[in-house]
Amino acid sequence: MRKIYGWVLALVVLVIVVATPGCAHVEPTSTSQPVIQITDALGRALEFSELPKNIVITGRATQLLLDTLYLFPEAKERITHLEYRSQNPTNFLPLVDPLAEQKMGLERDAGVEQIAPLKPDVVIMKSYLKTDLGDPIEQVGIKVLYLDLETPEAFYREVEMLGTFFGNPLRSQEIVEYYQQRVQSIETRTQSIDDDHRPGVLVLQYSVTGDEVAFKVPPATWLQTRMVKSAGGNPVWTADNSGEGWTVVSLEQIAAWNPEMVFLVDYKGNAPEVVARLSRNEAWQSLPAMAAGKVYPFPCDFLSWDQADSRWILGQEWLAKMIQPELFSDLDLRDETISFYKQMYGLSDKGIEEQVLTLLADEVSIEQTSK
């Protein structure tokens, strides 16, 4: 009986101790809520219990993704491995990440067998790679984050998402505002231009595969088309290209479109050389745009300014000055380039002068205006 009373007394004392404030601490029950919740370019929800610290970048267009990710200072600490691609110059990333070259360990078209042993928190790739590359990676339990970035709207939306992903929403707001203010400054001037004052413009990609030379035009919905319209031009190719990728066109089709201005893109960085070579070609000399000296190489420093890369805003400003020079006579492209690399990547004036502007000076003058 005394044992029973002893147990009862001990129980009463325990209840009193637990119930008395300051006498004991009871840990709250964990709710297991994720630290971040984001939605990627394919509308898929991803959850992370902590900010990802082991990030792998792979697949085609790796450099375009990296240039956007490195707009965030956290990227250099958290991106651990990346894939080397043809548009993956080793001379830019070291400017923003001293360890970039050490991270270029993935082989071209790296698959599950290379990526899984790295045990990444997440793998980031372009959205069109889901079936061929993303699905096999997810099947082994690795999270995949898809980015698109192919239109201004997608760029703004995904930069805002990356602000949450990196735990730095203030930076994402700064980035979006930087781009939107510059686009608005251009479109405020060009939106009222009537069709008669919008020159016919053709954006043309030059490519070589073996001995085969091809000229291609972008889809009507892609960034290059949007840039021409915003800059006050009329993209002459859109009625004939509603496809989902670059479409090969003949010289006869180019002549039929009869563009007043042609902007030539070469993703190998040789656009000025290509334009110079075409200017000596008899067939091209018959085109009115070439005869008028209005076939221009698209600017390229580390990458061409026309594509879905962080530099598209520079390409947008350059196009506006080229297509509507009178409207944008006050736009100083040198100042805009310096501002871009300072505010978006934190480069110094000296670094920009020596590492960036010299590339543009060698290839195409950023002060060039249409003739």
Image (spheres, helix red, strand yellow):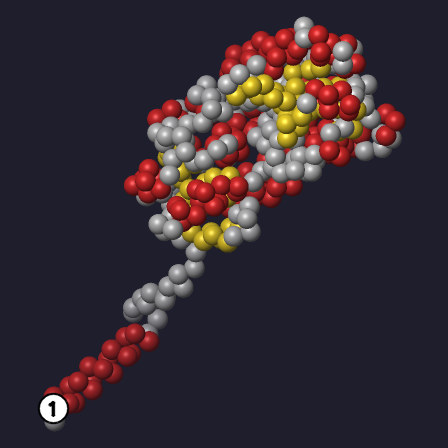
**Residue 198 seen:** yes
Specify the quadrant that holds the N terminus.
Answer: bottom left
Name above or below for residue 25 compared with residue 214. below
Q: Is 87 left, or right, of 237 in this rendering?
A: left
Which picture quadrant has residue 78?
top left
Name above or below for residue 134 compared with residue 293. below
**Residue 312 seen:** no
Q: Residue at x 73, y 24 (%)?
A: 253
Q: Residue at x 76, y 34 (%)?
A: 239
Residue 123, percent across and down? 42, 42
Label 1: which residue?
A: 2
**What secondary structure is marked by label 1?**
helix
Name above or below for residue 96 compared with residue 49. above
Label 1 Cα crowd, 10 Å radius (few <14 / some 14-19 / many 20+): few
Residue 177, percent across and down? 64, 37
Q: Is 265 left, or right, of 195 in this rendering?
A: left
Camera-nearest residue between 255 and 191 = 255
